[in-house]
Amino acid sequence: MSLADAAFVHSFRRKLRAGDKLRLAWLALGSPALAELAAACEPDGIVLDLQHGLWDRQALEAAVGLAGHRAPVIVRAADLSPMAIATGLDAGASAIMAPLVETAAQARDLVRAGRYPPEGARSGGGVRPLGAGLAGMLAMGREVALGVMIETAAGVAAADAICAVPGLDFIFIGTGDLALSMSGASADEIDVACARVRDAAVRHGLPCGRFTPNAKTARAAYAAGFTIAVAINDIDLARSGFAAALDDARF
């Protein structure tokens, strides 16, 4: 399968538009080998966390190359800058999650950075996109899904305006940062804030997801009306796996 073919066969944008419930694998440890193993299990998307994870540029490129032929690869950008967004897209990511979006203006900046002219101002380039030729690069660009992460109280307050921005494909709630932003809030209050974002996304026809630490909480998120959730993350999987194995070896 060519790089361009993989971009279409494993398009996160198409999965979003199908309306199914999507299971994500969230990877922060910076290991292309783990990305390849995760992709072999055929999740609906693999998130490479460049904001808080251990990914460098070479590992990112390797992970997209190894995993992108089996599953959509989503890059959580390091920040909201055009360069950070371009880093993920030039590597060949199927989707971008822009972190800590708090205003409609920031959401518009994501769309501008993530789309080629005339829709946006994305620069043409990247070894992997250009490997498909100019026409292939542009076609792959049209398949890119752009999503904002709402993960602060300010973002929740502006959720309706953010979700109204043309060119967005999905909304994702970062529950960890949201809890930090809403210092002292109860779990129920966090859920109410998440529901407010979900409802705004639904009003504007956008799929909405939230970060969940495991499959059990992912199922609860689906039951609450979210369509995207994290079924597994590499840090917790490694930690729990090591602990379980050592416990089994006790004598």
Image: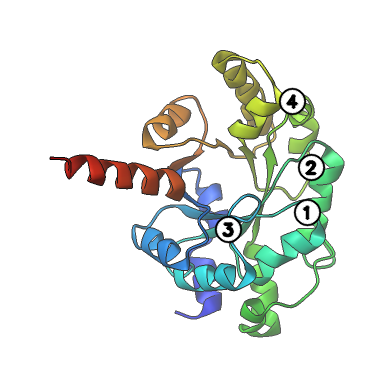
Instruction: Name the residue type under label 1.
Output: Val
Under mark 3, the amino acid is Leu
Q: Amino acid at mark 4?
A: Ala
Residue at image mark 1: 111
What residue appears at the point 51 percent right and 73 percent down from the top-left corner?
65
Q: Is residue 188 visible?
A: yes
Q: Residue at x 66, y 22 (%)?
A: 196
**158 sits left or right of 169 in the view:** right
Mark-to-mark CA distance, 2 and 1: 9 Å
Q: CA distance from mark 3 to mark 4?
A: 27 Å
Q: Is residue 21 visible?
A: no
Q: Nearer the viewer, residue 60 or 239?
A: 239
Tag on residue 13?
none
Coordinates of residue 188 in the picture (x, y in percent): 56, 14
Q: Mark 2–mark 4 contact, CB under 8 Å?
A: no
Q: Amino acid at mark 2?
A: Val
Q: Nearer the N terminus, badge 2 or badge 4? A: 4
Task: Indicate which label's residue lies in the foreground, 2 or 4.
Answer: 4
Which residue corresponds to mark 3? 54
On the image, the x and y values in percent for residue 145 come to 64, 55
> Considering the image in quadrants, where does the N terminus appear?
bottom left
Mark 2 or 1 closer to N-term?
A: 1
Few, some or many residues within 10 Å of mark 4 (<14, 14–19, 20+): some
